[in-house]
Structures are given as structure tokens and as C-alpha cells.
Amino acid sequence: MRGRSYSPSPPRGYSRRGRSPSPRGRYGGRGRDLPTSLLVRNLRHDCRPEDLRRPFEQFGALKDIYLPRDYYTGEPRGFGFVQYSDPHDAAEAKHHMDGRVFLGRELTVVFAEENRKKPVDMRARERPRGRVGDRRRSPPRYSRSPRRSRSPPPRHSRSPPPRHARSRSHSRDYYSPPKRRHHSRSVSPQERRYSQEKSYSRSRSRSQTPIRGAFVGINIGTDVSNMPSAPDVVAILKANQITHVRLYDADAHMLKALADSGIEVMVGVTNEEILGIGESASKAAAWINQNVAAYLPSTNITAIAVGSEVLTTIPNVVPVLVPAMNYLHKALVASNLNFQVKVSTPQSMDVIPRPFPPSTATFNSSWDSTIYQILQFLKNTNSYYMLNAYPYFGYTSGNGIFPLDYALFRSLPPVKQIVDPNTLSHYDSMFDAMVDAAYYSINALNMTGIPIVVTETGWPWLGGANEPDATADNAETFNNNMIQRVRNDSGPPSQPKFPINTYIYEMFNEDKRPGPVSEKNWGLFFSNGSSVYTFSLSTSSRVTGNNSDFCIAKPNADPGKLQAGLNWACGQGGANCSVIQEGQPCYLPNTYQNHASYAYNDYYQKMHAAGATCDFDGTATTTSANPSYGSCKFSGSSTFTPNSTAGFTPSVAPGPVTPQGGSGTTNLQVLRIQFVISSMFLALVLL
């Protein structure tokens, strides 16, 4: 237990305000109705009743000590009541304790007002009876729309991971006519009174300030068959100048690999972990110590995402969601990390049943109690609302009401521009409308000044036969336009001063995900580090785009040699050949030249920095012309050197790493001979 101390009181007769030596007798005899309760202000938020007992009981017998807590968050409010049996003892304590430094803070001690409730009455106030209290104790337990539960990602360790759910969902009635806002939806006067009382937050300022310098980060899911090692993942991030990442758990390998990388990290509490943390402050403290404090400051952890879409995916956990957030924040405060690390919880657009027009959007009234508590917590801790917003689902479920260009951030002609009929605000994209709907919903609960961070958004680049909008062209357009929009450092029409920090879903194609084809194809990268399509998260240039040479098969190359080169590239060369399989974007035309071109180029882009050449026994050549066609996107070469940090470079380049004009086949034979010689030498050494 951490030691606690208090400063000794000044000598009797001394007063910083020139008070008389003793208050006894000042209020008359014992027969008068004298106050016995003291109001003690400016207490530390980790102060306990037993801490107050020691200094105050020296003046007389104590009847009660009470430290009020915030109605919604359960956090201490920074003041307390001390009640004596004898009013003269209370007067003596007030005289000597007012102005004393206690636990590092100067106390203010006054008599409690005569009409103030006694501590026992104040305790009852924390759990109000009646309709409002009953509703808060029993939050609604349903999710409006079907979900895609995310299976647990494989960890880098052999131990079984804790299961967690990540889900992307969309409202089937995204664009159905909105209901009129009713005054009965507003927060009760009792709720409003509590929300206006002083916060328990230890932050320097209660006021929220807009987030400066908007960034675009990336989500890292791990439901990948060939998941790269943690160091390789970080190498890809650095190669593409990605400065912010979100992890869905607190994987030790990733957190260690991210050390000293300069990348800001959001770690996740899985949905399955919430129940234990929400019921035990000690478990929350242990989680912080193990998954946050242990890696700071080397790993720049800046946020904790508590669960993923908890309200609409696992309603049985909802009652402990806010307590879990509170316990985690308390643990951060105890470790003096609450300014560095913010706590929030991502929610989907499904908590807003009718987000258009944004000005009439409100949260699902069934969740008002919990969402209000979440917002109160975010306000008190200077945190932000985490929103998962997917225009892809908004568009595909909209039955053609809004044009595709609106979802892809493309310009619309004047006659098709989207306007909120109530505010006359113009919305250039569905993304902005979704974010603004969340702001209006927050405002409908009488909350303001809470920034929104989009923790998930994106577009699938490949879908099934019934998913015609999941294409590489659309995904490339959406993400590049979204990146450009976020980086203009402005917010949606209702909150133009709040930039929209955003995390793209996602880094890799999670081929192990259940569900339709599109569910497995949201990634920006293949597991070998090559990009799925052209995009740029760099502020200066397109670091993964098609801005250099491509390696393709020669038009008149021998088919037998092409087949041999293709087999080598897809096998030993490690090229990603999944997209040239039947039914995939690069399968047609079904020729050796076409398939070899894709495989050659994929290998070349990965290994060029390690010395690989574009030869393949004379069947390949380089070109500056982009060979991409339709939905088949070729990875472009980055201009980086073997020792550069500007690209994802494996330590060696297996395969056709040849001198200028050399033969890949000849080099393979040399490598085999070298391997045999090395093996013989190693055997001699071991003997």
C-alpha cells in the first residue's frame, strides 16, 4: 500500500487569516442547535475515508465520514463530509484543519450548510429511486441490426488468445425517413444538474480543445493465414510512413516491436476482457501495469479502446462497460499516465438509427442511459468519442437513394448535392454526414465539446458476385479521397474546428475471417508487404504507388520458361499469386504471360531493394507503363535502397538476384552449390 501522510497543523493560536485562538464558546452553549458536519474541499481523488479519519479524529469522536462520487462515472468528486458527535469538536476541527496541507493539497474546511443532507442521506442520492433510477440500473439489452462477429486473431505466441469480437455493421434503414425530435428525448433535470457539477477529472482543464494536425492511421487485424512477424509489420508501417496504429488487443510482440518507432499506438481491451475489468479495480490496475505501463515510454501508447461496438454486439457486458472505463482511468491516474493515455470505447453507427439528415440524428433511446454515462466520462477525462463509420455499408444498404460518388468523396453536380433540409448544410461525402450525425446525437444529450475520432472506416477491394461495389477501383478511390479529406484539418459542417482523426480498416487482408468474400478483403497490404492498390499515407509523396518500374513477362517469351518462372515466383520466390487464381481479379486473361507478369512484378517489388533483378531466365523485362487493368492492380516499385528505411525489405533476396544481364537459372544453381558447401562446412564444425 502506498504510504500516505499529511502535514502537521500550525501551532494553536496561529492562523493564516488572523482567526482567534480557539472557536470554543463562539457559538454559545451546548443547548443550541450547532452544526456538527464539516464540508472538506480540494481533496485528492484517491483520498479514502480512512485517510481523513486520522487527522480529523484528533479533535473528537467522529460520527461519519462520507466522500461523494459522481452519479454517472462513480468517480470521487474532490470533496467530502466529516460529521462529529459534538458540535464543539466540529468547530475545533474547522479552526485547525482549514488551510492545512493534506496529501499535497491545501484544504478548505467550512461548516456544512444546515439544509444540506447528512451523509446517510447523501449516499441515498447516488442511487435514486423511481423510473429514472430503475432504467439506469437495467439498461436495454438488444442490438437492432445483425452483426458480423470477428473471430479472435492468432497471436504471435503459442498460447491461446483471449477471444474478442470486432464487428462492422450497417443500419438497414440508414436513409429511412427520420422521426421528429421530441422533447421527451431530452435529459431529465436531475441528470442535467448532476452533469453541471464539478468534474472529478485531474486534467489541467475541463474544456475540450480541437485536435490539431489531423492524422490517418491504420487498424491491424491478425486473422491472416501468413501473418508477418511483428518486426516485419513495423517495417511495413515505417516504409509507408504510417504514424498511428490501432491494435485490437495488447499483443506483447507488437508492443515490443513498436518500441522507439515513433508510431502512436492505440491498444485494445477485448470484449471478453471487459467483464473482469468492469467488476474489479485490481484487474484493471493489473491490465494497465501489464499492457501499458510496462511498455511506456519506449512504445508510444496514447489510447485504450475498451471493447469494440459493445452496445450492439454483446449487450450482456453493457452494465460493466462504464465501470471498466472508470477503473482503467483510475489505474492510469495512479500511475500518472492519465495525461498520456486516453480511454474510450468504439461504437458503430447502429447506435444512431436514422443518421440522415444529420441535424435530426439521435442515439437509440434504449441506450441513452449508458451513452450518457460514456459521454460524461469522456467529458470529464478530456477524451474523445470513438466511432466506426463505414460509408460502404451506408451506400450498399441505401437502395440507391444516394449516388456512389457521394460515398467515394467524389464531386457531385449542383443538382445532386446533398443538403440537410434543416440546417441547409452541404455534405460533400457520406463520411462527413455520418460524423456529423454522431455530433448531433451527442448534442441531443446536452453534451458538447467532445471530439470524435473515427476508429474504423474503409472499403473492400474484392467481393462476391452479389457484391458488385467491392472493387479495387472503388477501394482505391475511397481511401485516397478519404486521406486527402481528413488531412485538410477540418471537421464536418456542424463542427468545422474539430478535425476528424481516422483509422483505416485495415492493414492486411484477413483471409481467415468468416462471412462473404468482401469480409476478407479490406486490407491495404498483402501479407508479403506489397500494396493491394495505389495509396499514400505519406504527407509528401505516394510511397506505395505505381511511380516507378514494373517487372513483366516479355510478349514473345518461351511458354515453357514462363511456366518455370511462374512456378518459381509463386513458390520459392514468395510472390502473392492468390489474385491470379480462378475467379480472382487477375485471372483473366488466362495466359502464361499475364499470370507470369503479375507474379514476376509482385516478387520484384518485394525483393528489388535486396538486389533482385527482373530477368527470370530472360523471360522478363521492366517497364514504366502501369500494367494494371480493371480490378487487377499491380504493385508499383518504391525507389528505396537495400539499407533504406523507406521500404519493407527482407534481409535476403532468394531467387533470381543476378548481375546485370545475368541468368536467374544460373544464379539458382550457384545458390544451390553454395548451400551444399555451407552445409558441409557446418557439419565439419559441429564434429
Image: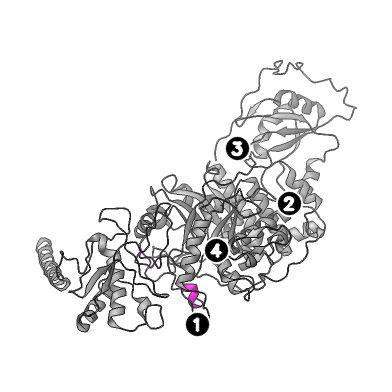
Look at mark 1 in the image and give the residue it sits on: 465
Q: Label 4: which residue?
A: 409
- Mark 4 or mark 3: whose residue is earlier in sequence: 3
Do the residues under discs 1 and 4 have CB atoms within 8 angstroms? no
Q: Does residue 236 belong to the magenta stretch?
A: no
- Residue labelled with disc 2: 446
Disc 1 marks a residue whose amino acid type is: Ala
Chief secondary structure of the magenta portion: loop
Residue at image point 81% right, 30% down: 86
The stretch in magenta equals 509-537
What's the CA distance linking mark 4 and mark 3? 38 Å
Position of residue 624 measured from the top left corner of the image (x, y, whole percent): 30, 66
Q: Which residue is under mark 3?
A: 204
Q: Amino acid at mark 3?
A: Arg
Residue positioned 56% across, 43% down in the render: 333
Asked whether the beta carbons under mark 1 and mark 2 sit within 8 Å of each other, the answer is no
Quote the CA–CA distance across marks 3 and 1: 55 Å
The first of marks 1 and 2 along the sequence is 2
Q: Say whether marks 4 and 3 touch (CB < 8 Å).
A: no
Which callout, 3 or 2, points at the residue further toward the start of the chain?
3
Q: Secondary structure at mark 1?
A: loop
Label 3 and label 2: CA atoms lie apart by 23 Å
From the top left corner, tell me how far across and down residue 523 is, in percent: 44, 67
Which residue is pictured at 25% across the width and 73% down the height? 572
Q: Nearer the viewer, residue 79 or 354?
A: 354
Q: Residues within 10 Å of mark 2 (few under 14, many from 20)?
A: some
